[in-house]
Image: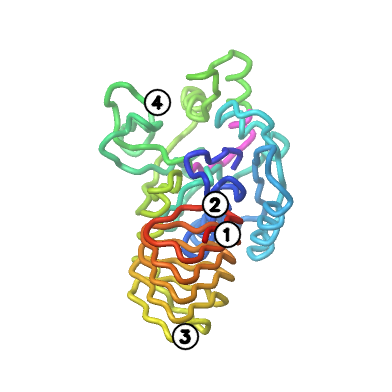
């Protein structure tokens, strides 16, 4: 979770990207909830690798998420961004036993996983047309034979999406240490997790892959909007909307239970998060984040940051948290 989320600004200027709400839940909670339902054993501890700029509110959000899921939280700071392997080794004191390593800036769907004991590592993948921007897995049969970071020539269309089950985390720790000892790094002098896994492969460990049903990027503003639309289509609201009065909804629309909608027309593809208030407005293809206020406005393709106030703004608006536009 240590990335700055620069491509998602201004929305991530105050709220860290993995803690942004996507159709009612922050990304981190969606990840924890998904693993709770797909792994054969419960999650006991969450080790969150953060950047140095996280404020007290971020820790409070993570504490609350862990409390809801009965997980013990632990926090590690990556002081300097030196790659994915460096981020993981920052948590060296916790790298023992089995665990899952996951990048917390995507939303995904997967089927339950069984027989984890058959593999030292399970890498989740997604088949894509152009894998050149990703690390890829090369397989023979059901076993992985190599990991390659951002291949220049086509060798596999199975993109690694940043989700790994590791049966013995101490072996991953040792493989990452080899990268530092031998200065095995990639572009920009960064240390890649795929290189550590490739070293484990060469040591004879057994790697297999598992496919996700959906892999949804949240790394840019456009991608965040697309992911929200996908979830609105696939997660129709079943809870009541007690705060909605004298308004028209064109589904799909998500309205948090404590949000207030008055004299407005919403949808399609609108997500109104907890504590938000929309009055005398028409919205479509828009996200209203926590505790924001929108009144006397006509908006489309808009993102209104948490605790922001928008009054009388027509057309398209994208403002970060705690903004005020009239």
Q: Callout 3: 10 Å neighbours few (<14), some, many (20+)?
A: few
Name which of mark 4 and mark 2 comes first in the sequence.
Answer: 4
Q: Identify the residue position indicated by label 4 in the image.
A: 148
Which residue is nearer to you in this view: 190 or 148?
A: 190
Residue 103 location (% of width, % of height): 52, 43
Q: Identify the residue position indicated by label 3 in the image.
A: 245
Q: Is residue 17 left or right of residue 146?
A: right
Q: Which residues are magenta?
A: 163-173
Relative to 183, is 51 above or below? Answer: below
- Residue at image location 59% in from the left, 47% down from the top: 16
Q: CA distance from mark 1 to mark 3?
A: 22 Å
Q: Dots 4 and 1: beta carbons under 8 Å? A: no
- Residue at image location 49% in from the left, 48% down from the top: 116
Q: Quadrant of residue 302?
A: bottom left
**Residue 184 part of the magenta-drawn span:** no
Name which of mark 4 and mark 1 comes first in the sequence.
Answer: 4
Residue 269 location (% of width, % of height): 36, 65
Tag nearer the camera, 4 or 2: 2
**Residue 172 part of the magenta-drawn span:** yes
Q: Identify the residue position indicated by label 1 in the image.
A: 306
Relative to 185, is 33 above or below? Answer: below
Relative to 100, is 178 above or below? Answer: above
Q: Visible in this render: residue 197?
A: yes
Q: Identify the residue position indicated by label 2 in the image.
A: 320
Which label sits on residue 294? none
Dot 2: element: loop
Q: CA distance from mark 2 to mark 3?
A: 27 Å
């Amino acid at each position: 979770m240590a990335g700055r989320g620069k491509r998602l600004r201004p929305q991530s200027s105050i709220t860290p990207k993995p803690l942004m709400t996507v159709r009612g839940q922050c990304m981190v909670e969606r990840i924890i909830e998904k693993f709770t339902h797909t792994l054969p054993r419960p999650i006991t501890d969450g080790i969150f690798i953060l950047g140095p700029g996280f404020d007290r509110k971020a820790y409070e959000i993570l504490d609350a998420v862990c409390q809801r899921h009965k997980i013990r939280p632990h926090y590690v700071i990556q002081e300097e961004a030196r790659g994915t392997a460096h981020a993981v080794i920052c948590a060296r004191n916790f790298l023992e036993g089995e665990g899952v390593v996951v990048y917390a800036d995507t939303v995904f769907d997967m089927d339950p996983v069984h027989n984890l004991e058959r593999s030292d590592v399970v890498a989740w993948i997604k088949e894509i047309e152009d894998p050149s921007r990703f690390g890829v897995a090369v397989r023979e049969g059901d076993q992985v034979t190599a990991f390659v970071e951002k291949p220049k020539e086509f060798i596999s269309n199975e993109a690694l999406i940043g989700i790994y089950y590791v049966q013995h985390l101490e072996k991953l720790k040792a493989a990452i240490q080899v990268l530092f000892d031998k200065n095995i790094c990639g572009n920009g002098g960064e240390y890649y997790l795929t290189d550590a896994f490739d070293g484990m492969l060469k040591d004879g460990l057994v790697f297999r892959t598992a496919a996700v049903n959906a892999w949804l990027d949240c790394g840019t503003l456009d991608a965040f909007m697309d992911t929200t639309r996908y979830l609105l289509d696939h997660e129709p609201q079943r809870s009541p909307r007690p705060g909605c009065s004298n308004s028209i909804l064109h589904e799909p629309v998500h309205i948090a239970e404590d949000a207030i909608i008055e004299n407005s027309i919403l949808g399609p593809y609108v997500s109104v998060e907890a504590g938000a208030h929309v009055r005398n407005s028409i919205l479509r293809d828009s996200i209203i984040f926590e505790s924001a206020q929108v009144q006397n406005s006509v908006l489309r393709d808009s993102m209104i940051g948490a605790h922001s106030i928008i009054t009388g703004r027509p057309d398209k608006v994208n403002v970060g948290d705690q903004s005020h536009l009239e």
